[in-house]
Amino acid sequence: MPELPEMETYKTLLNQKVGGKTLTGVSINREKSINVSPADFVNIVQNERIEVIERRAKHLLFHLKNGHVLLVHLMLGGRMFYGTEQEKPDRTVQIQLSFGNQHLYFIGLRLGYLHLFSEAEVKQELTDLGPEPLDANFTLDSFLDLVKNRRGKIKTTLVNQEFLSGIGNCYSDEIAWHAQLLPKRKMNELNDNEKVQLYQSIRFILQQAIQYGGYMDQPFFKGDTKTGTYDNKKYVYGRAGEACKRCGTSIVKEEISSRKTFYCKGCQT
């Protein structure tokens, strides 16, 4: 599932490709992927200009000139591709937004969606999300205050979207590895130094993953060589049985609170 770095990568590329452009066509092939009737969706969205694309947690917000907002959550298996009809992947397209002969394809939206809201409605929709971990205002003091009364495991705490926004299975494991903490450790058992390290690791891993375009190695457009290059940089996620890049011990895979989790028994404590 796309997490903060993947959606941040999409945001940057989308602003480059479609920011400021006018939607010339809309095709809805799966009504369950939207939250209004196809007729209303097309009527409100078609011929509108996209002012800017923003990210909030694992969501993208397409702000339209008419004041409406398209809220995207790709969920498990969802992706986007931008290009011509000839360039698009051989996959079923649930929604297509057209910009002349270039199109934005929404693919694999089995669980994901593209919902249409007013500015007020979208704000209400996202109200339960926790702080953005890379926000300038998310300081060490803010983090220490946030974890003060937390008692859950590191893994389950990091993926809790009401605690912090945008971290999922992949980056929770990468963060725990970088902080040299076992993901099953309880938050209330961490000493002050470990809490500081966890905060620093959150910032480091997410920034590094953004730098390398996230871990989902599916190009956003023909010739895209950046998206997904973090997949080859991963420290533990998806590397069960391989050698730890820090100490050489084999990476372990197990379930923590029904979530697949990867870590190193050699250097995470």
Image (spheres, rainbow, N blue to C red):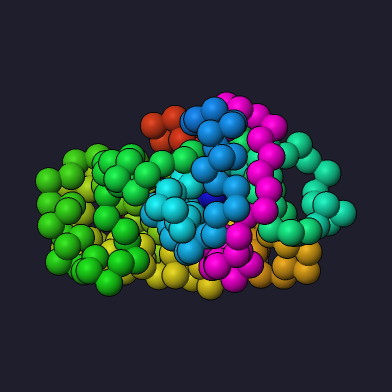
Q: Residue at x 68, y 48 (%)?
A: 25
Does the magenta segment cover residue 241? no
What range is drawn magenta here?
8-33
Identify the image quadrant of residue 74.
Answer: top right
Q: Quadrant of the N terminus?
A: top right
**In x, y percent, where is residue 268?**
39, 56
State the residue in front, 244 or 152. Answer: 152
Q: Residue at x 87, y 54 (%)?
A: 86
State the residue in front, 257 or 72. Answer: 72
How many numbered tags mark residues here? Answer: 0
Mark yes or no: residue 177 visible: no
Q: Is residue 258 left or right of residue 119?
A: right
Q: Quadrant of the C terminus?
A: bottom left
Residue 118, compared with residue 60, is above or below; it is above
Mark yes or no: residue 20 visible: yes
Identify the image quadrant of residue 231.
Answer: bottom right
**In x, y percent, where is residue 35?**
49, 31
Q: Residue furthest right?
A: 86
**In x, y percent, where is residue 230?**
60, 64
**In x, y percent, where is residue 170?**
50, 50
Q: Residue at x 40, y 70 (%)?
A: 204
Q: Residue at x 48, y 47 (%)?
A: 70
